[in-house]
Structure formats: C-alpha cells, structure tokens
Image (spheres, coloured by chain):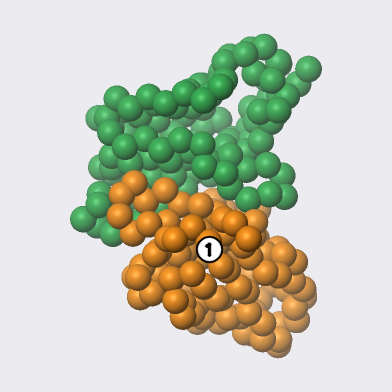
Amino acid sequence: ETGVTQTPRHLVMGMTNKKSLKCEQHLGHNAMYWYKQSAKKPLELMFVYSLEERVENNSVPSRFSPECPNSSHLFLHLHTLQPEDSALYLCASSHDRGPYEQYFGPGTRLTVT
Amino acid sequence: ELKVEQNPLFLSMQEGKNYTIYCNYSTTSDRLYWYRQDPGKSLESLFVLLSNGAVKQEGRLMASLDTKARLSTLHITAAVHDLSATYFCAVAPPVNNAGNMLTFGGGTRLMVKP
C-alpha cells in the first residue's frame, strides 16, 4: 500500500448505528486530519492530530469521535448520526513541519438513513 | 477568522483558450496550496506556494502568490479536456498559529469543451 488509504470506501448507516472509519498513511508523516466534504459547503476541517495529540477539533459535534493510536493510523468513530452528516469524509496526512503539504486519501462516502 | 474565496465557482471554456482562477484570502498568510479533484475522487496536490512572488508551473497550469494582495491565481494556458476537474485553493495561517490547519476555498469547477 502506498500513500493514504481509507476504509470503507462507502458506508450506509442508520441513525442509531455505531460505525468507524479508518485511515492509514504510508508516507512517514506525523500529522493526520479528518475533513468533511458536502455538496453545500466548502471542505471543512474536523480534527487535526500532530504527533498523536489532538490539536484542533473545530467545534465538531460529539457524535464524531476521533482516535489516533499512532502516527500512521487515524479513526473516526460515528454514533447516532443525523442525515445531514451524509458527506464524503476525507483523511489527509502531512509532516508536522513546513511546508505542511497535505496528502489526501480517497475518502469514505457516508450516507445516513 | 480566515476566509478564502475563489472565483469563478464554475467555468466552462473551449479547448485552446486561456483563463485564470482567482483565490482571495482574508488574513496574513505566506503559504497557499492548490489541489485538483476529479469527480468521485480525492484531492490531488498541484502546487505549494511558500512566499510572496512565488510562481510554479506544471504543464498548462501556472500558479502564483501575492501575499501583499492576499491573492493567488491559477492560470490555464491552451486548455484541454483533461483539465476538466474542480480546483481548490487552501490557505494556511501563520506558522506560529498552528500551521497545519488549512482553510479551503469553495472550489472552481472547470469544464473544458472541445
């Protein structure tokens, strides 16, 4: 595997379900990010982890819970989501020093029914 | 709060023509990124601009940064169909303000017609 990978690529879940999104980077980076991309809004930064510590959560609802067990893996745990949470969730990684260029994974297309 | 605006939001152009996409941002920054996204795909990094006056070119695309004007441009020369995609600019805050957190523009959807 190379670059940034995400699983699953597609996910349909009910509002009462609990699921997790997984991201793995193979680039030797030490910062990882979760973004939300929906049709009606620009790409929104949700969470940032640098050296495995969360540095930003950007006022994201608590039904989204990130986890970063090491610098190569990032999870987004989902529970009791709303239909408006349906979106493409993108993971990215970078070095934690300049130029901070971020490399993106293919995304998980989430549909909440 | 950093705000990033792109225009136009949608651009339909003929093959062979030239055009420019603009990216304006609201607060001090000296780092700006351009990404490309094909439908149903992820974001691909195109350019990283790290200083005032920076200019980078790759094929038919050229990006520049004017930090004093808080403006970056992405110029397309002699467009071809393969350039059809959505282009995003993203701006970073000053490094001492948590330099990893990018703010993205709304994107410019480019369609190049034969």
Q: Is residue B47 above or below residue A4?
A: above
Q: Is residue A2 left or right of residue A113?
A: left
From the top left corner, tell me how far across and down residue A91 is, in percent: 55, 62
Residue type for callout 1? Gln
User: In front: A108, or A41?
Assistant: A108
Quadrant housing the C terminus of chain B:
top right
From the top left corner, tell me how far across and down residue A17 is, in percent: 71, 86
From the top left corner, tell me how far across and down residue A96 is, in percent: 33, 59
Please, which chain is the residue tagged with disc 1 on? A
Residue A4 seen from this side: yes
Rendered image quadrant of residue B8? top right
- Neighbourhood count class around disc 1 (C-alpha, 10 Å): few under 14, some 14–19, many 20 upward: many
Spot the orange chain and give its letter. Answer: A
SS class, disc 1: strand
From the top left corner, tell me how far across and down residue A76 is, in percent: 56, 76
Residue at 25% across, 52% down: B95
Q: Is residue A57 left or right of residue B96?
A: right
Residue at 28% across, 42% down: B29
Q: Is residue A68 above or below residue A88?
A: below
State the residue position of label 1: A25
Colour representing chain B: green
